[in-house]
Amino acid sequence: MDDRIPMTREGYDKLRAELEKFRGPMMIEITKRVASAREMGDLSENAEYHAAREDQGQLQARINELADRLGRAIIVDPSALPKDTVVFGSKVTVKDLEYNEEETYELVGPGQEKPESGRILTTSPIGQGLLGKKKGEIAEIEVPSGTLRFQILEIASAQID
């Protein structure tokens, strides 16, 4: 399985800025909270210390996740990709064959997803099921609630920011 993560330059820069904020000001703030709480005495009964340490652990986990994503990132120029196939950077209109409704999805990389407005990750189940399809083809996508069946109606380039 390919573990590279496609991203636009803008998406990569957005994640990198978030990582720098977490590693810098936010980690310094939490480290100060831990040190301050530690000075309050008995650590075994110090709720503020334990809360600060938990926050520090969660922040470190997020830092690790972002660093991993950035380390596996591959910068993609959507304008250089095929226009007749669903790929990263595509805006695809589909017809849900069960409900006879049209839906539009934009396939984006990490940091650019907004599922509520149809911007989904290429690594999501629906994104994976649509990749490689051409206009007129049927995509059968396994999701936890069953199988989605979409007919590809239109493929265009998304305006990924």
Image (cartoon, grey):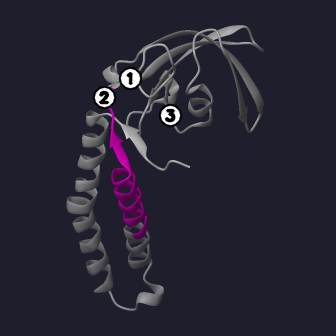
Is 25 a magenta residue?
A: no
**Residue type for callout 1:** Leu
Q: Which residues are magenta?
A: 57-77
**Residue type for callout 3:** Thr
- Where is mark 1, residue-wise? 81
Rendering coords of residue 62 (x, y %): 40, 58
Rendering coords of residue 77 (x, y %): 30, 28
Q: Which mark is residue 122?
A: 3
Res 96 quadrant in image: top right
State the SS at label 1: loop
Determine crowd level at label 1: few under 14, some 14-19, many 20+ residues with C-alpha closer than 10 A: some
Q: Which mark is residue 77?
A: 2
Q: Earlier in the sequence, mark 3 or mark 1?
A: 1
- Is residue 157 found left or right of 93 in the rendered image? left
Q: CA distance from mark 3 to mark 1?
A: 14 Å
As drawn, which residue projects farthest toward the bottom? 42
Which of 57/155 is in front? 155
Is 14 located above or below residue 116 in the figure?
below
